Amino acid sequence: MTFDSFLHKIEQIKGATPAGIDAHRLMIPVERIPYLYADDFEERNPRESAVMMLLYPKGQKTHVLLIERATYKGVHSGQVGFPGGKYEQEDVDLVHTALRETQEEVGIVDRDIQIIQPYTKIYIPPSNFYVQPYLGISQKELSFTPDDFEVANIIELPLDVLLQDQLIQEVQMKTSYASWTHVPAFIYKNYTIWGATAMMLSELKETLKIALKTPH
């Protein structure tokens, strides 16, 4: 999809209701589905965080920004995710968190990002984070400056590729709740996108599929 065509649908995208849990459950192992509907995690006092689902033009095509996290001591080491991180006291709100983290991790400043809307929050048990995703759009081609300490690689996923169902495969993964289990994942090039990021990406995909088909 050309970026110009994408921009012509911006009002439909703004008005689209996020697909929510129905989209999340497409990318979660069967044994984990009951946790989507449980709210007992609130008793664990989860830490607030936010991520940026950033869409932008590259070579006239619409792309989604993902990052491969650097290797470090932590549960999300080496995983693919969206730019983002935990809420800090100096943050005005979670939008500010997502924008600040995006600048810190990949060098894109807030003036180059238009926030479209929040998507559905996701609780991440291993790290005890409650994550708020935001859909953002940049209307110009971007030059990234990744933070070497936090980011191993920049991943530019074409929106046309994301919207293809064949991107999803079932893979065997070692997880926090099972030594080895089969999980649904997006496979792009040599990257495996699973877990909370896959759930958020699924919601983005399913919501945009509806919005992009909606006539003017």
Image: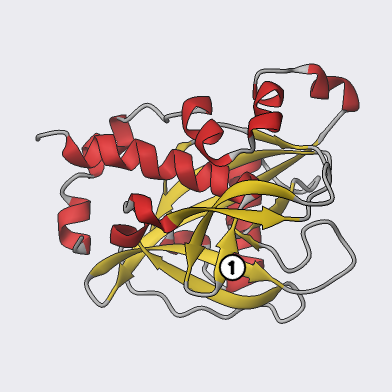
Q: Quadrant of the N terminus?
A: bottom left
| Amino acid at pointer 1 | Ile
In x, y percent, where is residue 182?
66, 47
Q: Is residue 138 visible?
A: no
Q: Which element type, helix, strand or loop, lies under badge 1?
A: strand
Q: Residue at x 33, y 59 (%)?
A: 159
Question: Toward which corner of the image does residue 38 lie, by quadrant?
Answer: top right
Q: In this view, does 55 lie to the left or right of 7?
A: right
In x, y percent, where is residue 169?
49, 54
Relative to 59, say whether 6 is above or below.
above
Relative to 182, say whether 117 is above or below.
above
Q: Residue at x 32, y 51 (%)?
A: 163
Q: Is residue 145 left or right of residue 115?
A: right
| Residue identifier under label 1 | 67
Q: Residue at x 79, y 48 (%)?
A: 88
In x, y percent, where is residue 45?
87, 28
Q: In this view, does 69 lie to the left or right of 174?
A: left
Relative to 183, say whether 149 is above or below.
below
Classed neighbour count for the residue bearing mark 1: other residues with Cα under 10 Å, few (<14), some (14–19), many (≥20):
many
Which residue appears farthest toward the left when viewing the image?
216
Q: Which of 106 and 72 is in front in this view?
A: 72
